[in-house]
Amino acid sequence: MASTAKMDLLQGTLDVLILKALSWGPLHGYAIVRWITQRTDDALRIEEGALYPALHRMEQREWIEAEWGVSENNRRAKFYRLTETGRRQLRAEAESWRRYAEAVGKVLATATA
């Protein structure tokens, strides 16, 4: 991205980003944030005030499960992992986002009059 400004997340984007991060394996909150930041070349940054409510909501929907463990720097941390319901949700969300991005791309590619 040419601009150094950070992008704001669209409504509903955070869930699919978290699900995708967890599709690679169990992660604690900070590692989820780091994974998203790295994969977006620092374009998206997730604030704790948004992350933890999203994780809690996703646990209630049974998309993810959590258990306590020890992080890479020997700290107690809650590790989250996808459930089968979460994997189905990720597939559905990813397909929806692909269709959305394709539709927006078509509009942006339209020549001006």
Image: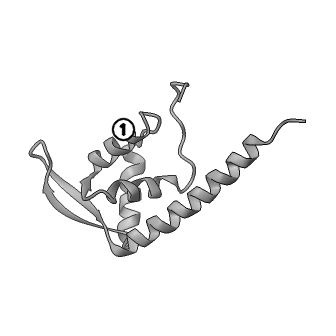
What secondary structure is marked by label 1? helix
Residue lying at 65% horizontally and 52% vertically, measured from the top left = 102
User: x, y percentage for residue 40?
Assistant: 44, 39
Horizontal side of 77 relative to 95 (left or right) equals left
User: x, y percentage for residue 36?
Assistant: 38, 44
Amino acid at circle 1: Gln
Residue furthest toward the right?
113
Relative to 34, say whether 82 is above or below.
Answer: below
Horizontal side of 22 relative to 93 (left or right) equals left
Of residues 63 and 24, the one drawn nearer to the viewer in this rendering = 24
How packed is label 1: few (under 14 Cα within 10 Å), some, or many (20 or more)?
few
**Colouring scheme, one of rainbow, by chain, secondary structure, one colour:** one colour
User: x, y percentage for residue 32?
Assistant: 32, 49
Query: The C terminus appears in which quarter of the rendering?
Result: top right
Of residues 47 and 35, the one drawn nearer to the viewer in this rendering = 35
Of residues 98 and 13, the one drawn nearer to the viewer in this rendering = 98
- Residue that numbered label 1 is attached to: 38
Horizontal side of 4 relative to 73 (left or right) equals right
Residue lying at 69% horizontally and 53% vertically, measured from the top left = 103
Horizontal side of 77 relative to 31 (left or right) equals left
